[in-house]
Amino acid sequence: SFAGLPCLMELNLRRNNLRKLEPDTFKGLNKLEVLDLNENRIFFVHKMAFLGLPYLKSLALNNNCLCSIPQSIVLLKSLRYFTFLNNVKTSPLLVEDLKRLSVVDMGINKIGCDCREREAKKWL
């Protein structure tokens, strides 16, 4: 629980062998701006996992076991930098959800190829 850290602005959880991000995982981190979740074994991110992070600007989910970009990033209205390198495979992208970001890095991922993703690939 992060309840006792309301002023924390940066959190590095790299290499902590995390596997799932459940609802309210980061509850109490109201001022968090930077979250590093790189190099874990995350395979599941609940759609409410990032609820309560209104100031989160940077999210790194590199080198995990995710098959798609977590839907929960849509709720992160302050998010500007998102990295998602070297995960399992990336399912269809919703460009409208990513347009507000300044940096999106999804290198070393297998991106599917179908008509639904044509707009996303053009935008990238």
Image (cartoon, rainbow, N blue to C red):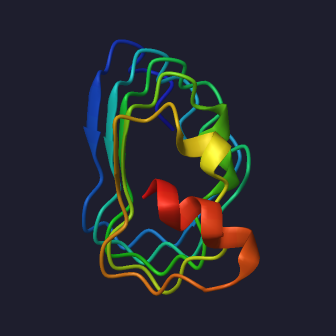
Above or below, 44 relative to 29: below
Above or below, 26 relative to 72: above
Quarter residue 108 falls in: bottom left
Quadrant for the C terminus, please: bottom left
Q: Residue drawn at (41%, 15%), measured in percent from left and top?
A: 31
In the picture, measured across the screen, residue 12 lies left or right of residue 101, that is left
Q: Is residue 25 among the parts visible in the rendering? A: no
Quarter residue 81 falls in: top left
Above or below, 38 relative to 53: below
Q: Nearer the viewer, residue 75 or 93?
A: 93
Residue 48 point in image, percent of width and height = 72, 43
Q: Residue drawn at (32%, 67%), measured in percent from left and top?
A: 62
Residue 102 point in image, percent of width and height = 34, 34
Residue 47 point in image, percent of width and height = 73, 50
In the picture, measured across the screen, residue 57 lies left or right of residue 89, that is left
Q: Residue drawn at (33%, 79%), measured in percent from left and top?
A: 86
Quarter residue 98 falls in: top right
Q: Nearer the viewer, residue 112 or 83?
A: 112
Q: Residue drawn at (40%, 81%), measured in percent from left and top?
A: 109
Q: Is residue 110 among the parts visible in the rendering? A: yes
How many numbered discs? 0
